[in-house]
Amino acid sequence: MLLFVYYSIALDSTDISTLGKGKAFASTSGVEVYSKEALDDEIRRLTTANVQLVTDKIKTEKVRINLKTNKARLLGEKNSLVVKREKLRTEIVALNVAGSSNVPIRGH
């Protein structure tokens, strides 16, 4: 005959202490009691959740860095387009002035 014995662990806000044999979760006067298996399951669940949170944090950080890089690149492109627009405006003004006097202007 095989006999499996395990102990419950009582958790409260100040300490962890070993109690007698137990099989299931119970709550008495603010102290929660878990079986070793239930506590192991809870630790596994929390560990899995923690790994997922860390993975999500890493992915979020990668996205944040990519967004920052894209923002810098787009600002550079915008500044380049602003400079080109100003050059075109200057050429338009010059063409308008030249058009009114019929003098050909050679661009660079």
Image (cartoon, grey):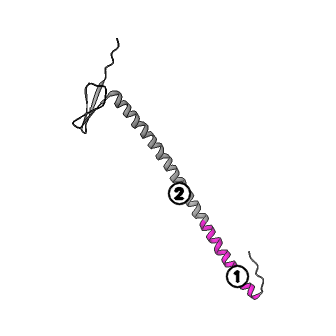
Mark 1 or mark 2: name the one nearer the start of the chain. Answer: 2
Q: Position of residue 94 (x, y in %)?
A: 70, 82
SS under mark 1: helix
SS under mark 2: helix
Residue 92 part of the magenta segment: yes
Magenta span:
78-101
Please identify the quarter of the rendering in which residue 53 is found. top left
In this figure, which residue is indicated by the disc labeled 2?
68
Give the main secondary structure of the magenta stretch.
helix
Left or right of residue 35: residue 87: right
Residue occupying the point 78% across, 83% down: 104
Name the one closer to the observer, 28 or 91: 28
In this figure, which residue is indicated by the disc labeled 1?
94
Whole-number angstrom distance, CA of label 1 to CA of label 2: 39 Å
Q: Position of residue 7 (x, y in %)?
A: 29, 25
**Amino acid type, callout 2:** Lys
Q: Position of residue 52 (x, y in %)?
A: 46, 41
**Amino acid type, callout 1:** Ala
